[in-house]
Image (cartoon, rainbow, N blue to C red):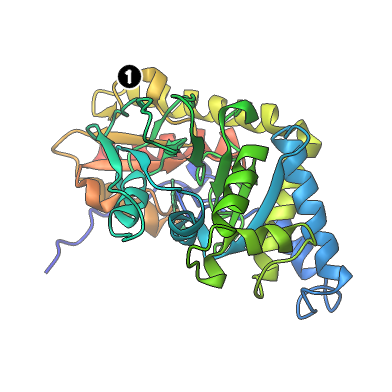
Amino acid sequence: MTDPLPPIVIPGELLPADGRFGSGPTRVRVSALESLASTGAAYMGTSHRQSTVRDVVGRLRTGLSNLFALPDGYEVLLGNGGATAFWDAAVFGLISSKSQHLQFGEFSSKFGAAVAKAPHLDPPDIIESAPGTHPEPVGRDDVDLYALTHNETSTGVTMRLRRPGPGIVAVDATSAAGGIPVDPEDFDVYYFSPQKAFGSDGGLWVAACSPAGVGRIEAIASSGRYIPPSLDLSIALANGRKNQTYNTPALATIHLLLDTVEWINEQGGLAWSAGRCAANAAIVYGWAEARSYATPFVSDPTLRSPVTATIDLEDGIPYTTVSAILRAHGIIDIDGYRKLGRNQLRIGMWPTVPADDLEALTACIDYVVDRL
Ligand SMILES: *Cc1c(COP(=O)(O)O)cnc(C)c1O
């Protein structure tokens, strides 16, 4: 038996306009959903090999090139299965023999774990640090791929990207892309899923690749190594150049992603969206620092994520109770990452989340905590 919730009713005027504050999937803009619905019979249910869909994929590739200001020679490719499938594709087609992984939370641990089991690769070099911090990469002669994570979504830690030495740099940008500034000089492969900062749906991976990244894909593919076709990045590359994917993609996901990428570009691009996230973060961390019962989990302010805030609550205030009361009011998905096991709230501050909603959220949390 779980205890009944305290009978706290939050006044309607305190509630945010939209109660979705999840860290993935994140809120999808209602206008993007309406735009998808308005395509009627003209898009959904049509062949991904014909121009209707290929034009949308083409606009997406161009929109992302503009968003990230990709220099000439960089390419955008996509495939099915999300960032998780991209790790497997990278095991087959991006690591020549040895990779280095910075491990500082759930997501940044998974790529290295997948590599460790691959019989055709050397054991990976894994550098770990405690949740709430991040390790630095270390240049080593035998490492040919450095695996970085721009934003560790499980702990709310962001890291500055830098090249540790020769070898390509592959960045898991799943929750960073679109919300955190990035310089294409700092990566060779910047890959992400669309259901985080871009507020689309899941199921796809997207990767922006430098000429060196493309070169690595081509070199391994022509080396004779066995690569399952659905994980073959050279096949994804060839299809991408034709604005296609190897097998059927989720057309709704592509549409929603394009809608938000073009929206961000119209507002002023990555500088605009990253500025919006930084302003959101100032609201949430500023609120937590001003409250006696709340503390930002990441103690170093320079490592605090501008897109996913992790906020510890005082022991006497169980996050499960706060979250359940808020959920009953339509404010959802702010529970801390389960496996981190802390008394913690995690709040998505994505480009799709307006500051007003975060002001309202913090006021609602205060209202509940004051009455517990
Ligand atoms: C969500 C997330 C993933 C996993 O994305 P899927 O689309 O579920 O495969 C990987 N890395 C990071 C940093 C994430 O936030």
Name the residue nearer the viewer: 291 or 76.
76
Q: Nearer the viewer, residue 264 or 50?
A: 50
Residue at the disc numbered 1: 300
- In this rendering, would 297 be left or right of 285? left
**Is the N terminus in the top left, top right, bottom left or bottom right quadrant?**
bottom left
Q: Is residue 220 visible?
A: yes
The answer to which of 3 and 84 lies nearer the viewer is: 84
Could you tell me the amino acid type at mark 1? Asp
Q: Badge 1 local density, few (<14 within 10 Å), some, or many (20+)? A: few
Q: Quadrant of residue 84?
A: bottom left
The residue drawn where x is 72% and y is 35% is: 70
Residue 339, percent from left and from top? 23, 51
Between 62 and 29, the one lying in front of the other is: 62
> Residue 239, position in %: x, y?
72, 64
Query: Is residue 199 visible from the viewing direction of this image?
Result: no
Give how far across and how far down residue 365 sits, in percent. Answer: 36, 39
Q: Give the percent coordinates (x, y) of residue 14.
A: 49, 41
* Depicted 241 relative to depicted 151: above or below: below
